[in-house]
Image (spheres, coloured by chain):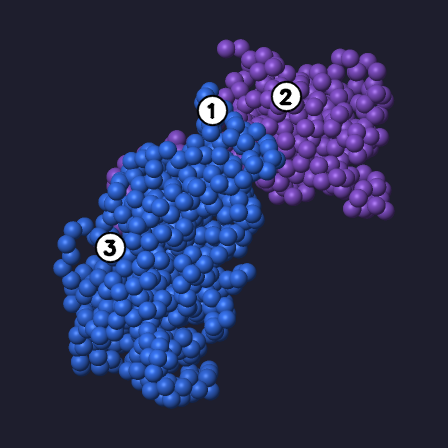
Amino acid sequence: MSVEKRSVTRFELLMDAGFGAQKAGDILLQAFVGMGKYIYVEPMIPAEISPPARTRPALSGVIIRLADFDITNIGNDTDFILASHEMVLDTRLDDKEYNSNCRILLDMGDREANPDSYEMVLKRCTNEGLSVIPFDVDPPSQVLVKELGGKGQNLYYLGMLSYIYNMDEEIVKREIQKTFGKKLNEEIYAKNITLFHNGYQLAKEKVFFTYQVESALRQGEKILIDGNTALSMGIIDAGIKFFSGYPITPASSIMHTLARVFASYGGMVHQAEDEIAAIGTAIGSYYGGVPAVTCTSGPGLSLKQEFIGYAQVAEIPIIVIDAQRSGPSTGMPTKTEQSDLPAVIFGSHGDYTKIVISVANVIDCFYAPHIARYLAEKLRLPVFIMSDFQTANSYKVITKPQVVEMNNVDDIPDFILERFHMDRLPKEIEMVHTSQSVPGTEAGMCRVTGLNTDAKGHVNYYSGTNQRSHRVRNEKVHHVRRALVKPEMFGSDSGDLLVVGWGSTRGAVEEAVSLCKKEGIKAAGMHLRIVYPLPLILKDIFAKYKKIVTVEVAYGDALKASPLAMLLRCETLFDVQPMIAEATGRPIRPKIIVNRVKETLSCQLSLKT
Amino acid sequence: MSVVLKDLNTENPRWCVGCGDFGIIMGLKRFIVDRQLQPAATVNVSGIGCSGRAPNYFNTYGVHAIHGRPITVALGLALTRPDLNVFVHSGDGDALSIGGNHLMHGINKNFKCVFLLYDNELYALTKNQTSPTTRKDHVTNTQPQGSFLQPINPLTVALGLGGSFVASTADWIPDHLTATMKAAFDHPGFAFVHISQRCPHFDPENFDHKTSTWFSFLKHDKGIAPDKRIAPKTEVVAHDPSDLVAAFKYAFAQRRYFGLFYQNTAKPRYDRILRDLVAKAEQKPRSKILDHYLI
């Protein structure tokens, strides 16, 4: 028996959808947090509810990165996998995210019925140098699982994991009680607890290793929260009072959360008949002076575009959250990607004047609604908050953010502006319509329209008037350009290579830069929180590096720049290359960035010599 | 300060001479004056098309939105600003074609607004194309062989969707038009008002506004009074607006009927339901919103 001490380690629980892998994951993360560990959790969720068991699309699992220090991303490789059968294991191995000495506990329960398949996967593991430890669920537990109609297996695995990660049984049981106590009747609950104990015992008898991650001392109040929940709470704190949406993965959980709690904070949740109606109703609310937000993902974003263009011209503020998923079209609904950037910036016909904010982590999620509302109301333009599947669903322990209870946008605290690397906007900002009040107000009564208008709001097709409208709208965006200061940087102020990223790649870039530093590689990192417009200072910063590259979860190649690379090129005229532009649906890992940095730099070197 | 008709005017409407839309906005302006609705508390919401221009010609608040979607914007206002008077102006293409989904859900949600369907039975602003209500065999630019299909009947659609207020009137019967607006405004819910509207430019023969033998009025104590001037020259039938079966009968008829087809004041309202949810929820301080997630 060996207890292996780790500062940071990563493991996975892989099961068929519908058998409680996500619930087991929830209990585990709560228990780890209760024991003082730092965690970063990424669920792997199928796009269907219950795909046929033992098929590739059925994989449902959870990746947990565990550390004794604060971690910002899901990390590099998996050290340990617990798989409910050979098919889920085979599916997941394709992603090649395991360590060379990764251990695998494989449930052999299905072997009798599928001997060839098991043999094939076991052979694959041997070929790839992975050590598989086969096990069978003990016979009494098999009977129990059968009695529970196949459910309860997750509790058995939870028991095994509790032993393997040296977890306090009582803490885990407390979390099980919290999760299932009210939902299950006594008898079924008792059976689940028995399964948990039996799993724990089995691991104790059969598994010869355990992992020990020290508990960290935490300063100050901490919370455990996922991206979409943090966004929901941010919406409340930012003083937004109206939410409308249409069900779409991975944005829906924002609507679920608000549907439960928003009314207690004076907010209304409207489930619209379609994506277009969702934004139309939000625009109606904001026109009436009630701050509103709508949230969506790729396909819904495409549908909302006409209204987004309309809001620019009608000068009605609107906030749109785009929780990106893999596209184009329906794509991979439960996989992460960052390909919506061009659609968000350039989408909707005609000229584009909007502001695009991105979130990199749960703290950003909490404060993004504040800054979005500030910009939307000061500029009367559409403001986007771009998240993605990974940020939306990842859980993290963070220091409790300061609640600001914003009412008037002018009261936005400096620290939020600083977080998004911008100064306060000028007090006076010219509008296309010189006088536009909210209904109910005598002064400033007006009509809004998507047609071009003069300063008084009258429909007007004269060339000069239209050019004026364009100038005024674009000047609003320029105000933001000028207010943007130096974005967040990692590493040295100059060097051989600058890696630029946005959104959910932040943690991986930050960690990669520090790994590079340890190896003496002169690579720095930049993270953009406001993605459109870009700060004017960008050119000056780029000039200090020999090469500028991007890291993006979006497609790009030698002939076609990925979205961020394209944007940076046209805004700075620097030859920005996509260093990693992959739309695999998986988050980018720090190790991969470091490897590519080395390749890029050695390639440059060989070109010189 | 009392509101007079000229207070409600803005610029000269950019509609064709003889367009039925003039009559419709005049009918609404007359109602606003009769009821002394405050212009600052009144919002006209529209989509795209000739009818879509209407809000620009009212000196009130107004949202000239995008094609087919005025109901969605009106709902946002009705939910969050119950203090406002919300009128929706939509055409047959706007409401029954591109915006069909919103009409279906607007009627079902039964939120408080007056919905005016300007039905000229073709697309006019885009220059004479077949619309969902164009009569079969009528020649248009998109179906020059004569329109292919039987038209959609807006009244049976509204009744079939469970409309709580379904009325019909015409742009050239001003008193009846204003009386219909009044009944619609007083209805607690989504008031669907179908308005037969002339388009002298593209379809001058469609509605013979000089004769009255081709239409009838529906009459009832709880309904809308038939037009005093025209009623003696045509048929007036008694119809109880609480009788849904009879309402369908008149709506399906070949002959046109003007008046109140159906009204149900007891139908639940979505806007009230959402507001009640907020009003009845235990109010919590925002300062503690993150405490639930403390570890």
Give the SS element for disc 2: helix
Residue A138 location (% of width, % of height): 32, 77
**Mark 3 or 1 closer to N-term?**
3
Q: Colour of chain B?
A: purple
Q: Could you give the CA–CA distance between mark 3 and mark 1, rounded to whole angstroms?
A: 45 Å
The type of residue carrying mark 2 is Leu
Q: Nearer the viewer, residue B64 or A600?
A: A600
Q: Quadrant of the N terminus of chain A?
A: bottom left
Q: Which mark is residue A444?
A: 1
Task: Tell me if A593 is positioned left or right of B112 in this view.
Answer: left
User: Whole-Å distance between the Cαs marked 1 and 2?
Assistant: 22 Å
Mark 3, other Cα within 10 Å: few <14 / some 14–19 / many ≥20: many
Are the residues flagged by discs 1 and 2 from a single subunit? no
Q: Is residue A456 left or right of residue A176?
A: right
Residue at screen point 19% across, 70% down: A7
Circles 1 and 2: CB atoms closer than 8 Å? no
Q: Chain A colour?
A: blue
Q: Amino acid at mark 1?
A: Gly
Q: Nearer the viewer, mark 1 or mark 2?
A: 1
Q: Does residue B139 sit above or below A130 in this rendering?
A: above
Q: Chain of mark 3?
A: A
Q: List the residue tagged with mark 3.
A: A398
The foreground one among A480 and B153 is A480
State the image coordinates of residue A346 (x, y, percent, origin top left): 50, 52
Kind of residue at disc 3: Ile
Q: Quadrant of residue A592?
A: bottom left
Mark 2 lies on residue? B28
On the picture, is A432 further left or further right than B203? left
Report if the CB atoms under discs 2 and 3 are less than 8 Å apart: no
Which disc number belongs to residue A342?
none
Q: Which residue lies at the image location 60% right of the left edge and 33% below the top edge?
A: A460
